[in-house]
Image (spheres, grey):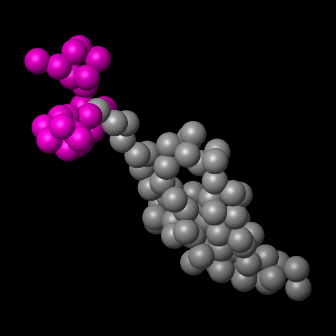
Amino acid sequence: MPAPRYRSRTLRRVHVRTPGGTSKIQYRKRNPKVAKCSKCEAKLKGVPRGRPYKMMQMAKTKKRPERPYGGILCSKCLKKLMIDRARKEK
């Protein structure tokens, strides 16, 4: 039976082949959920899902798209927002 700290399902079980030829189970943390648009809750494209320590190692341009509200709004909601703003300025 695994140690009590490994019994939780928050850790995922990965079967790994060791150099000795035996198969062992390693316990790894799960990835966080996919980033979502703050308006329509759609999955954001171009935003990786990684643990915080992995995200800190990435460059800023790799974490989110290079456009206004990148990583916050999806492209459809951004387009609607820009059109609404342009109409209000007139």
Q: For the point 59% across and 48% down, which residue is it?
A: 55
- Residue 10, horizontal then vertical, whole percent: 31, 32
- Residue 5, horizontal then vertical, whole percent: 29, 17
First to last magenta residue range: 1-26
Considering the image in quadrants, where does the C terminus appear? Answer: bottom right
Queried whether the magenta region covers residue 22, the answer comes back as yes
In the image, farthest residue toward the top: 4
The answer to whether residue 77 is above or below residue 48 is: below
Queried whether the magenta region covers residue 32, the answer comes back as no
Q: For the point 20% across and 44% down, which residue is it?
A: 17
In the image, farthest residue toward the right: 90
- Indicate the quadrant where residue 3 lies: top left
Q: For the point 63% across and 63% down, which residue is it?
A: 62
Whether residue 47 can be seen here: yes
Front-most of residues 43 and 59: 59
Front-most of residues 21 and 42: 21
